[in-house]
Image: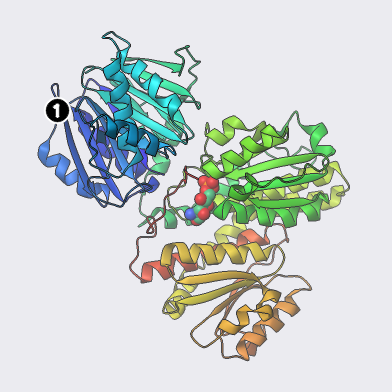
Amino acid sequence: MCGIVGYLGKGIAQDSLIDGLRRLEYRGYDSAGVAFHEGNAFSMTRETGRVKNLANLVKRKSSKSSLGIAHTRWATHGSVTVSNTHPHVSHDGKFVMVHNGVIENFGTFKRFLTNKGIKFSSETDSEVLCNLIAYHYSELPDGDDRFVDAIRQALPKCRGAYGVAVLCLDYPDTMIGARRGSPLVVGLGDDANFIASDASAFVGRAKEAVFLNDGELAILNGSDFRITNLEGQEAQAVALPVDQISEEVELGDFDSYMEKEIYEQPTALKNTLRGRFGDDGTTSKLGGLEGHDEVLRDLDRIIFVACGTARHACMVGEYLIERLARVPVEVEHASEFRYRNSPKAGKSLVIAVSQSGETLDTLEAVRESKTKGLLTLGITNVVGSSLARETDGGVYQRVGPEIGVASTKAFSSQVCLCAMLGLALGRMRDLSPMDGQSIVEALNQLPGLVAQVLQQGEQIRELAIKYSKAEHLLFLGRQSLYPVALEGALKLKEISYAHAEGYPAAELKHGPIALINPECPSVFIVEGSDLSAKTIANMQEVKARNGPVLAIAPHSVEIPEEAADDVFLLPDSHEVVRPILANLPLQLFAYHFARLRGLDVDKPRNLAKSVTVE
Ligand code: M6R
């Protein structure tokens, strides 16, 4: 949520900052702004809308400054206006700041500062924080540490979350970043150093990245940098190479990241699976779980915490793990889990799943679980993310950066990892070696089957054309395909703004069937099990009420002509991989449906890729 990038170096800051903002735009795209230290004042340029609007203005001004900060915003406090756009400058012009997160008690500071005669020009909590820092600065004696001390005095007073980058007019060679709850990373290059909300902002410009922990400050001074805590004690800086993430963030020949990421899935899944099976070919071997064997063998309950698409992946995981390992599984909305006093039953394991590893609701659920003394594991795609660092162990998805706001390849790999976890837990219990072997084989065949389904993309485009006038759609499936129905509906509504709902197929007759009419298509995801006859009966109920039916079904299931208007066939497959395969046509359906409406699928309205506020 919101992107921050700051540059301090020997060159001109402008191009690096605009380039960084473009790469971070997926985090928020309501408005964008930049501020440069110009010696005796800050020059600011801010504009509503996309980064390209800002870039045109910045190019015309052509600053030569080598110190600047920039921001792309997803609005929280205050509407989308130029005055609410970051950076924010303090009333005395001494400080300029960009901020991610929410300062919950900003009202108290605003009243305090207003009483001191300070006037505000925006509705944001961020402008208040900038002025709070300026206030503390004004109270401190001159000295080398006055800038950092002002920040150290202001931040501990704040409740809520922040990732900030701050400049002070009196320190033309210094940039300070700080985080609590919102991610922040320092980029170290030959000619410049950076502060950013994620490392993609300085790909190609910095060689190493140092991720800040909550409560830490990064003080960049000339070509030096150090990390301290808010009390001023030095903290350890662990530098990781940046080059792994380089070209993966380029769009290449694709029109959108969403399309690119859908078609990357065969490779992404190969990476998720690579080297993760035991030598005897009957189980999976997840490095991040090593050392926890005893707990895993003895579990009474798994609680998944996640949001959005990641939660749907966990719901598929619930079916798979219960089936393979016979361990009770619960799936919680991370945002609800945190405030719910869930009883501590037996030996529970909490697994948090988050593509970004920065979703605040999910992180808070992990923190709450740790307070209760529960073992926490993470499934995340982002190396070095807060989730990776705060859990007791975990597994990386390895699917490369996911930039499209609509999550696609991350879902597939999360489900794949849930299946692998179910397999490992099953083999520790009573899953036979033969069953284990057939699951290993099914998982190894998955990338090839995914490629096969994606080759039928044109058929899905034609179906999207046929149904693209619909404003209301239902998605229906049973068992592990019920969460796939939820995911299909989420994908469609978030990028096309059509209204879509997912239900267990049998629930249809308990209410949603009232919505059925010739203008409301139903998308049925048919399993390849004995249950398919029941789902087909539900399809017939819709057809009997003149509702259009699109069925997604495995090859071997015969769909009677009168039960569906259209059928999209999937290859026959093992049940553990079926949810991943069945979801692919729904991703493509949503993608084409939205494109046919002329919408930007990578930047759907009101959304942001990573939600770092509650
Ligand atoms: O980064 P996370 O996996 O924690 O993100 C969770 C959700 O915000 C995310 O899946 C969201 O629902 C996507 N927009 C869905 O496409």
The amino acid on which the numbered mark 1 sits, given as a three-letter code, is Lys
Establish whether ligand 1 lies closer than 8 Å to the Cβ of label 1: no
Tell me the residue at 28%/27% (across/down): 7
Residue 181 percent coordinates (x, y): 49, 34
Tell me the residue at 34%/22% (across/down): 176
Residue 267 percent coordinates (x, y): 54, 48
Examine the rendering and report whether any part of residue 152 can be seen: yes
346 with respect to 320 (left or right): right
Find residue 448 and report its image quarter: bottom right
Which image quarter is the N terminus in? top left
Q: Vertically, is 137 above or below 160?
A: above
Q: Which residue is mark 1?
A: 64
Element type at mark 1: loop
Question: Front-most of 596 and 115?
Answer: 115
Question: Front-most of 119 and 178?
Answer: 119
What's the colour scheme? Answer: rainbow
Question: Front-most of 515 and 245?
Answer: 515
515 with respect to 470 (left or right): right
Question: Front-most of 457 and 30?
Answer: 30
Residue 285 percent coordinates (x, y): 73, 38
588 with respect to 283 (left or right): left
Examine the rendering and report whether any part of residue 407 can be seen: no
Q: Residues within 10 Å of mark 1 (few under 14, many from 20)?
A: few
Tell me the residue at 34%/19% (across/down): 150
Residue 129 percent coordinates (x, y): 34, 32
